[in-house]
Image (spheres, grey):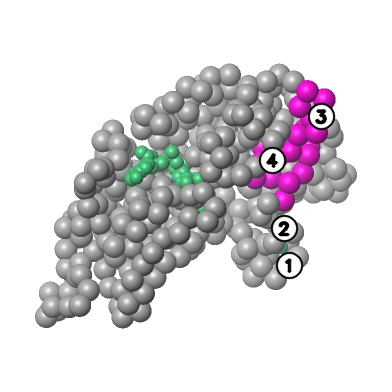
Amino acid sequence: MRGIVYTGDGAEVTDELGIGDPGPTQVKVSIQAAGVCHSDLSVINGTIPWKPPAVLGHEGAGIVEAVGSEVRSVKVGDHVVIATLASCGVCRACSTGHPSWCLSTLGNISFPFTYKGEPASNFAAVSVFAEQTIVAEVQVVKIPDSIPFTSACLIGCGVLTGVGAVLNRAKVRPGETSAVFGVGGVGLNVIQGLKIAGATKIVAVDNQPGKEALARQFGATDFVLAGEGIDSAKAVREAVPMSNEHAWGALFPLGGVTWAFDCVGHPAVLKSALDCLDWGGNAVAIGIPPRGTEVSVDINSLAYVDRGLLGCRYGSARPHHDVKLMVDLYQSGQLKLDELVSLTTPLEQFRDVVDAMHSGTVARGVLTF
Ligand SMILES: NC(=O)c1ccc[n+]([C@@H]2O[C@H](COP(=O)([O-])OP(=O)(O)OC[C@H]3O[C@@H](n4cnc5c(N)ncnc54)[C@H](O)[C@@H]3O)[C@@H](O)[C@H]2O)c1
Ligand SMILES: [Zn+2]
Ligand SMILES: [Zn+2]
């Protein structure tokens, strides 16, 4: 079987993968399309530590190939999006609608594959950079046959993560203002989530000038080009000046946004996100830097004026609700999926997608099989 393996020295396109049969509560999916998320690149470059060999990819859609004896929710031939949360369904987190807090969803590694005859693990409980994968029943969500796989696959991470951060974690309300740092596959979905939520100002920030047109296409009202010597927090404040005209001056800067999303994963970017907040504003950390990375903040700038910092994993998604919501929003014309696909290429040309991501020319690159 063909696929992309993290070998410890980088990523290798191989045809030396093997896969077994699904267990009683598992589903085997024939992958039709897979988006390349920055988190896959972060495994390859060591930002996210992962033990090799492992089959990469965690944003995919496909056709159910086989089901275990106890599987009831999908059948062979169904079109599905695969979610990364292999949640248990019975713990307190799952029971209260927070599967992203379920202890069984983080760092759970299994070995559905062989690579050159030796066991190879999955990544993010998914592994969609392969012709077939095996996941838990809870991870597959049926979608209509009419949605192209190249668009549907993006729901599996970038869309759920970005739109979910706005709707589930931040719960942005109409008329609120925002800044989005990093206009990649995740950031563009934060932008379109903000538009759906009714944010009136959406300031996009990226260090690639080519991202301005994409940001505006998805709903950004303003664009700030980040870079050496540019105070992007100040630029956001200038784009969203003081909202309270009766203020008489203050210990802390006035103006800025209600919500700032770090979709890059760099401490300087998260600091800018904190520094561009209005009073009462919150920054949301989505980007994943190396473990142990810290950001420093003047506690008074939080405590005196109700500012905050939140983390958000996987859009705080409840996949069986949120994947269907994304499908409904797409089918009613409120969510762009087709437009997120800038580049579609066979699995073998994985390197082209990586290069395009680094050059800032793509929204998402998608692999086909
Ligand atoms: N929390 C989660 O559950 C979750 C889920 C998915 C992805 N992620 C993380 O989110 C981040 C973004 O992922 P993606 O797939 O959108 O990546 P991407 O490569 O598609 O996009 C990143 C964007 O950030 C821009 N950028 C880089 N450095 C910048 C800087 N200093 N200032 C401004 N812009 C900058 C790039 O030009 C690019 O447009 C990654 O760290 C990824 O690991 C987290
Ligand atoms: Zn991802
Ligand atoms: Zn659970």
Say which residue appears at 37% left-offset and 29% top-offset.
Answer: 359
Q: Please say whether residue 159 is visible from this viewpoint.
A: no
Q: CA distance from mark 1 to mark 3?
A: 34 Å
- In reply to whether residue 109 is colored magenta, the answer given is yes
310 horizontally vs 235: left or right: right
Q: Secondary structure at mark 1?
A: loop
Say which residue appears at 82% left-offset and 48% top-offset.
Answer: 25
Q: Contact (CB < 8 A) between labels 1 and 2? A: yes
Q: Which residues are magenta?
A: 108-128
Task: List x then y, in percent, for residue 251.
Answer: 20, 77
* Residue corresponding to mark 2: 104
* Residue corresponding to mark 3: 118
165 horizontally vs 217: left or right: right
The quarter of the displayed image where residue 156 is located: top right
Residue at mark 1: C-beta within 8 A of ligand 3 = yes
Amino acid at circle 1: Cys
Q: Earlier in the sequence, mark 2 or mark 4?
A: 4
Q: Earlier in the sequence, mark 3 or mark 2?
A: 2
